[in-house]
Image (cartoon, rainbow, N blue to C red):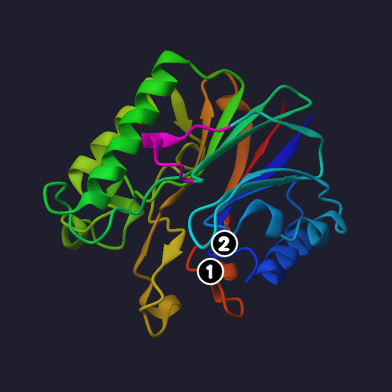
């Protein structure tokens, strides 16, 4: 059953429900994973997406912060969630498709502005979340699984506009890259996007602070699609929909896509 999956930090699903509809209408992924929904589950406008054929969903939400949702036009079964660090944050939800593929939708903490856990609790929270992810998937080796989301780390030198200038900037510091790499390795995850696009600059996020984000092009690849080793070879067609960053009242993230022939 071939299918296409997209992941997108929407930065408020209620505020940008129209952009979600635009993406579903124009790109028609079979599954869309959203992060930073910033809404209790009961207030997410699922009825708007159901009218477009996306009548299946799994979500975790909270008022004003975090929040993850999986929209699908294929039947799925809610497969629970992991409460990273026991904070009650809505940062993970899983769902299983009829073909047996389990999708993990994750929103890793951004980590604040200072890359030092001794003075910045948010940075410590980020590192601890990644450690728990490492331990969880190390102990529960994923099979027939896909992990997507805003992981808030650009791991490679060509995942940022300037490796040298961003080495001390949260999202690209060596300790974050190490923690993300450990989590990926422990679970045997394959970075599908970079398997398809092994070389060259590639971004999925551009700051709101840039007066002309497109011309400045100071981006980072913060949004990822990973697959367990047993199905990674079925992935293809990875791309970032850069144009969505230029839509009216956009998220600062662009959707990332991959297709799977399973």
Residue 129: image location, x then y, percent: 35, 37
Judging from the image, what secondary structure is the residue with disc 2 in?
loop
Q: Which residue is mark 1?
A: 251
Magenta segment: does it hold 190?
Answer: no
Q: Main secondary structure of the magenta part?
A: loop
Q: Residue at x 29, y 53 (%)?
A: 111
Say whether residue 148 is visible: yes
Report the magenta residues as a range. Answer: 81-89
Judging from the image, what secondary structure is the residue with disc 1 in?
loop
Residue 4: image location, x then y, percent: 70, 43
Horizontal relation, residue 133 to residue 12: left or right = left
Mark 1 crowdedness (10 Å alpha carbons): few <14, some 14-19, many ≥20: many
Q: Which mark is residue 10?
A: 2
Relative depth, front residue between 151 and 82: 82
Q: CB under 8 Å between callouts 1 and 2?
A: yes
**Quadrant that contains the N terminus:** top right
Relative depth, front residue between 218 and 183: 183
Say whether residue 187 is visible: no
On screen, 196 above or below 217?
above
Residue 240: image location, x then y, percent: 55, 56
User: Which of disc 2 and disc 1 is earlier in sequence?
Assistant: 2
Q: Disc 1 to disc 2, how far (Cα)?
A: 6 Å
Q: Residue at x 64, y 45 (%)?
A: 59
Horizontal relation, residue 18 to residue 86: left or right = right
Horizontal relation, residue 207 to residue 39: left or right = left
């Amino acid at each position: 059953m071939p299918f296409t999956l997209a992941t997108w930090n929407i930065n408020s699903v209620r505020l940008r429900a129209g952009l979600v509809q635009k993406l579903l209408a124009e790109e028609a992924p079979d599954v869309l994973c959203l992060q930073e929904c910033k809404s209790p589950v009961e207030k997410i406008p699922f009825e708007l997406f159901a009218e477009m054929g996306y009548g299946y969903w799994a979500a975790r939400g909270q008022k004003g912060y975090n929040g993850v949702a999986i929209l699908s036009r294929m039947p799925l079964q809610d497969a629970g969630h992991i409460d990273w660090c026991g904070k009650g944050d809505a940062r993970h939800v899983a769902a299983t498709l009829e073909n047996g593929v389990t999708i993990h939708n994750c929103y890793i903490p951004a980590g604040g502005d200072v890359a030092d856990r001794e003075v910045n609790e948010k940075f410590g929270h980020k590192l601890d979340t990644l450690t728990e992810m490492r331990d969880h998937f190390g102990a529960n080796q994923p099979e027939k699984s896909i992990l997507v989301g805003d992981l808030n780390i650009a791991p490679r030198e060509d995942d940022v506009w300037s490796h040298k200038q961003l080495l001390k900037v949260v999202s690209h510091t060596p300790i974050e890259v190490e923690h993300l790499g450990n989590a990926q390795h422990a679970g045997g995850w394959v970075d599908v996007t970079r398997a398809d696009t092994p070389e060259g600059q590639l971004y999925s996020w551009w700051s709101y602070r840039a007066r002309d984000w497109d011309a400045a092009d100071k981006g980072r690849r913060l949004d990822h699609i990973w697959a367990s080793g047993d199905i990674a070879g079925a992935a293809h067609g990875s791309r970032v929909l850069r144009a969505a960053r230029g839509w009216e009242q956009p998220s600062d993230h662009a959707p990332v896509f991959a297709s799977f022939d399973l």
